[in-house]
Structures are given as structure tokens and as C-alpha cells.
Amino acid sequence: MSTTATNERLSRALTAFLRQEVQAPATAITEFLDIIIESARRLQLDTLLPDLDRMRSASEQLNSFVTSIVKDSFADSPQGETSEAFHRRLRHDLRTPLNAIKGYSELLIEDMDERGEQSLRADLAKLQDHADQLLGQIDAMVALARGRRDDLGDGGHATIVAEVLRAVAPLPANRTLSEAIRSSSILVVDDNASNRDVLERRLTQNGHQVITAADGAAALDLATSQQFDLILLDLILPEMSGFEVLRRLKAAEQTNDVPVIVISALDELDSVVRCIEAGAEDYLSKPVNPVLLEARVRASLEKKWLHDREKKFIADLEQEKQRSEALLLNILPQAIVSRLRNGETIIADRISAATILFCDLVGFTTISQDMPADRVIDFLGRIFAEFDKLAAEYGVEKIKTIGDAYMVAAGIPDAQPDHAVRIATLATRMLESVNDIAAATAVNLQARIGVHSGPIVAGVIGTHKFAYDIWGDTVNTASRMESHSLPGRIQVSATTRSLLGDLFNFERRGFTVVKGKGTMETFFLNP
């Protein structure tokens, strides 16, 4: 970029910066007055309103005058008026409304101080600050109207602007912003064929796939039947307005996250605000500068891509959470998982009444020695999968497998009044399953089952490979019932027999020696 071009760019930017600097206090004065007037009406301070209305009129006069100054087209001085007279009048015309605003505000503050009314004092003080700031910039405004850039401020302004321009490099000549734009699917909605053709051509040239629609109904049909990354929407459409199309797009779950850029000949503030409030990503006025359009399209698409990536990330997290949940529920009961999530660090419960079942596959160790390893795992997995299915069906808790032994309990972690009935029914079904699988596979296999009921302790042990387990004499006795049972039989203790009553058929077995308890009467439960 040539030195001349650089200086011209700096001059334009410096002028724009100073326009902002002199116009901002004038705008702030009007806005603070609007706030003060609204507050005075809400607080019913009617005596203040006449002076506030006079100040508001002065602020409108001031803003109109400042606006005319900061425009490049500011009118020259009247014919016959000297430059010195013009600049003197300019200073006078700027100071007149400012002095009125300051004078009235000082009077109002004095009156409020006398009455002890402080509700509006802070805003009035800020109003005076902005008026003072603008009074201090009158010479800069006169210089702006005079068109002399060298009088617009000290070196600080130029340094600030120059730093901005160094950070924001100018666009090279004959270059668009199409580099590195990912190909996307874009819907163009405009009732004017020429507008559609131009937009389609520009977007297609940048590598996008473009589909067009001439009215709102067609646009909605396309948006719901296809996936788009961006929609360019005209506001003035026949039958259904672009605003209504926008509202429907944002109301539908399928399309509410598709960014929409409204492009319209309507440039009134109300239309812009309403569209943005309705969910539009941006609002551009026709005719649209092609480079600006491309920049807005790229920005909207990048936001959409980030949004899509975020959605995928959240979906992946949810899927992983579900996998973890399923894995955790394979290890711990649902009630125990909930307690751990609620902050319990030690899970330990005394269960007053539960029934424990042990099942052993008789002779499986010997049989497995003649099987390939994969068949051993497959065969055992087939039997235990059936046991798991039955345990879930009867609502009892699988505790663990130990080699070819299977342990299950009822009445934990939540109480079950019919715990003995559940286990007894499960035991008969487990025998049937083993017999069926043995017959189907021609493997000489039988199950031996033992059952006992009573109090236990249940809880979670371990920190890394944790497990939900049970302890107590009831567990030891149930294990003894299994080890002293017979192949193909279900041996239950007298305690369990008593709980089952007449619901099952029993065969008195005799007495079994139980460590620490001497002998116990036992029974065979017949399927």
C-alpha cells in the first residue's frame, strides 16, 4: 500500500474517530435526559417536568447541530459571511443549547438538595459531566466543520487510530474473502429472480451449494425437508412475509439452530430490531456490498460449524455417560448408584430379612478341562446370561459369580416381604435352564443349589474395582446349604422352609452340620 494511500486511510479513520468523540457526549446527553424524564414521571416528581422538557428540547437542537457538523456534507457558511464570523457563530450555536442544559440541571440539583430529594441527582450530575465534555470539544468540532485534520486533536488521537489500522489490514485490490471457506448448503429466499440469481452466482462461486425459493411457503418446505447451514432471507415476500418465515423457522426444533441472515430493502430500525429479537443472525440492507455479504456469510457459517461441533460433543458425552451408566448398573444396584451420586461415601446397611441363593455347576471344572478355552467361556457365559435374565425377571440382586458358582439375594438393597418366594421360584427356574442347556449341548451337567434366609450386612467395598457384596452368618449358611446339597436338587434351610409355607412341595432332607451352629434341619424344594 503506497504512502499516499496509507495517509489517506489514516486521515479518514482519524476523522471518523473524532466524529465519534464529539457525537457520543451529545447522544449521551439526550439519552440521560430520557432516563431522567422517565424516572421523574415514575416517581411523580411533576414539578421537575417543565424544566426537564426544556432541557430535552435543547438537547434535540444540540444533537441536530452536532450531526450536521460531523457529516462530510456540512453546509458552508452563508453567502457574504466571513470564515472568522462563521466559526464564531458556530461556537455560539453549539454553546447556546449546552449552556441551557447545564443551567437548568444546576437549578434542578439545587432544588433537589433543598428538598432532600436524591433519586435523580446522580443522573443529573452525569448529564452535567457530558455537557462539560462537549463544551471542551467545541474547538475540535469547529475544526471538523472547517475540514482541517491537523486541528482535530493532539498526537494521542492519531496514535490510537494508527494502532487500529495496523491491526486491521486493508483488503488487497480485487480480492474477496472466499479463501478457506468450507463448502456449505445455503438456502436463498427472495421473490425477485434477479436477486436470487446474483446471490446464487456469488455463493456458488465461493464453493457453496445453493438452493433458491421465491416465497415463504416454498422456503419452509425446503428448510424442513433438507438440511441447510445458512438461510439468506428477504423480508418483503408475497403472501407470507420474511418475518413470519423467520418466526416459524426459529419455532421449529428441526430448523431453530440454522442461522438466518435477513437481507432487505427495509432499513428502518424497528425491522432490524424485530428480526434480531426473532432470532436472525444478522440483518443486511439492500443493495448489499458483496465483500461485506461474504464476510457475514462466513462469520455465520463458522458459528454454525462451532455450534454443530458443540452439539456433537454434547451428544458424544451423553452417549459415553449412558455407557458408563450401563456399566455401573452391571456392577451396583440402581439404588446404590443413586446414593453414591447423592454424595454418600460409605454404603453399609443392615438388612433384617433377606434370602440368599448359591448355585454351583457340578463337575464343570472337570468338564472344562476337555474344552477349548473359548468354548468354556461361551458355555459358562450362556448359562450365566440365562441366570441374569431370570434374576432380573424376579427382581432379585445378582451379587457375583465365583468361578462356576452363582450367588444371588432377595430383599436387598430395598426390602422385599416376599424375598423367600422370589428366590425359591428363581431356584426352580435355574435348575430347568441348566437341564435345558445341558440337553441342547449334550454336556453332562447339573446344578446344585442351596438357600437360606436371615439378617445380613450389605455394602460397597473397594475404591477402584469396587463391588456390592453381602456378609454374615446367613451368607455362610446359604453357602453350606449349597455345598451339602445334591446334583439337580435345591436344599433350603428350615428358616426358609418356614417362610415359604405351603406354596411349594418339600421333601425333608435331615440335618446338616453348619460351622458355629451345630446341625440344622434341611429340606429339598421340589420343582
Image (cartoon, rainbow, N blue to C red):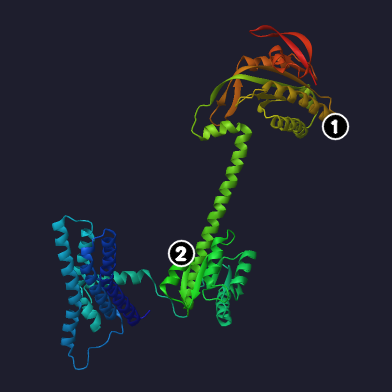
**Residue situated in front as seen by the camera: 36 or 398:** 36
Q: Answer with the quarter of the image where residue 485 lies.
A: top right
Q: Residues within 10 Å of mark 1 (few under 14, many from 20)?
A: few
Q: Residue at x 45, y 68 (%)?
A: 274
Label ID, residue 384: none
**Residue situated in front as seen by the camera: 83 or 274:** 274
Label whose residue precedes the other's in the sequence (2 or 1): 2
Which of label 2 and label 1 is nearer to you? 2
Horizontal and vertical percent for residue 414? 60, 27
Residue 141 position (above or below residue 366): below
Which quadrant, please, contains the C terminus?
top right
Q: Secondary structure at mark 1?
A: helix
Which residue is situated farthest in the bottom direction here? 80
Q: Answer with the quarter of the image where residue 122 lies.
A: bottom left
Residue indicated by mark 2: 277
Residue 255 position (above or below residue 369): below
Q: Secondary structure at mark 2?
A: helix
Q: Residue at x 18, y 86 (%)?
A: 86
Which residue is situated farthest in the top direction here? 518
Instruction: Give me the C-alpha separation between circle 2 and circle 1.
Output: 69 Å
Residue 76 position (above or below residue 304): below
Q: Amino acid at mark 2?
A: Glu
Residue indicated by mark 1: 440
Q: Amino acid at mark 1?
A: Ala
CB under 8 Å between discs 2 and 1? no
Horizontal and vertical percent for residue 10? 31, 77
Horizontal and vertical percent for residue 244? 54, 68
